[in-house]
C-alpha cells in the first residue's frame, strides 16, 4: 500500500465505470472535498471494491437513476460514499449484505460485497451499508489517513551532519 490521493483514484475509477453506468440509463456525479490528506491504499484493490459498489448501485436502479459518489475527510479517515436512489435495502437484509454467498439477485455468486469488505478491512478501514435519507442506500468506505513523516533529531544533533 502507498500513501496517495484517494480523490484522484476515485475519479479515475468512476471515469472507467461511467460508460457501463450510463448504458444502464444511470448518471453518476462525484463530489470531492478539497485538500484531503493522503490515505494508505492499494489502487487495484480499491478499484475492485469501488467497482463492486458502483455496480450494485446501478443494479439497484433497473429503470435508471442517479448515483452520488462523495470523497471527504471524517476524523482520521478519508471516506468514500456511494449513494443510490434505488428501492433501498430492508434492515434484516442490510445486516447480511457483507456475508459471503448472500445475494438477493437471481444471478451472481454473492461474493462482491464480501470481497469489498475484505479489501477495505485489509487496508485497516471499514465499510458500512446504511439507509439513505430520501430513499436508496449508502455504502461508505472509510480508509485511514496516511501517517505523516516526522523526523526528530537526537538532542544536541544538528541538521545536515
Image: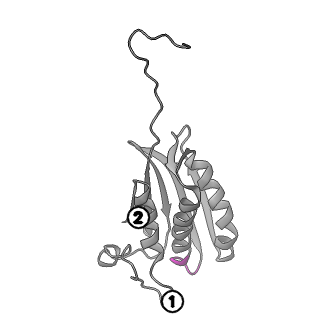
The part of the image, by quadrant, that contains residue 11 is bottom right
Magenta region, mostly helix, strand or loop? loop
Residue placed farthest to the bottom in the image? 106
Q: Secondary structure at mark 1?
A: loop
Residue drawn 56% across the image and 14% down it: 160
Q: Visible in this render: residue 135?
A: yes
Residue 113 to residue 124: above or below: below
Residue at point 33%, 78% (across, down)? 93
Residue 131 is one of the magenta-drawn residues: no
The quarter of the picture where residue 64 lies is bottom right
Residue depicted at 46% across the width and 27% down the height: 150
Provide the residue designation for mark 2: 132
Report the disc number at residue 70: none
Chain part drawn in magenta: 59-63
Residues 160 and 75: in front is 160
> Which residue is farthest front?
161
* Viewer-closest of 92 and 8: 8
Question: CA separation, marks 2 and 1?
Answer: 25 Å
Q: Is residue 16 left or right of residue 139?
A: right
Pinpoint residue 107: horizontal percent, then vertical percent: 51, 89
Residue identifier under label 1 = 107
Amino acid at each position: 500500500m502507498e500513501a496517495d490521493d484517494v480523490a484522484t483514484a476515485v475519479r479515475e475509477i468512476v471515469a472507467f465505470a461511467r460508460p457501463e453506468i450510463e448504458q444502464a440509463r444511470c448518471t453518476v456525479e462525484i463530489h470531492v472535498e478539497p485538500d484531503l490528506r493522503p490515505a494508505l491504499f492499494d489502487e487495484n484493490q480499491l478499484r475492485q471494491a469501488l467497482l463492486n459498489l458502483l455496480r450494485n448501485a446501478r443494479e439497484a436502479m433497473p429503470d435508471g437513476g442517479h448515483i452520488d459518489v462523495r470523497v471527504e475527510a471524517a476524523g482520521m479517515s478519508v471516506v468514500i460514499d456511494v449513494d443510490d436512489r434505488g428501492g433501498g435495502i430492508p434492515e434484516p437484509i442490510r445486516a447480511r449484505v457483507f456475508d459471503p454467498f448472500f445475494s438477493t439477485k437471481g444471478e451472481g455468486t454473492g461474493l462482491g460485497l464480501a470481497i469489498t469488505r475484505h479489501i477495505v478491512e485489509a487496508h485497516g478501514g471499514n465499510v458500512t451499508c446504511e439507509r439513505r435519507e430520501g430513499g436508496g442506500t449508502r455504502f461508505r468506505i472509510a480508509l485511514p489517513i496516511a501517517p505523516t513523516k516526522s523526523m526528530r533529531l537526537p538532542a544536541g544533533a544538528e541538521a545536515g551532519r
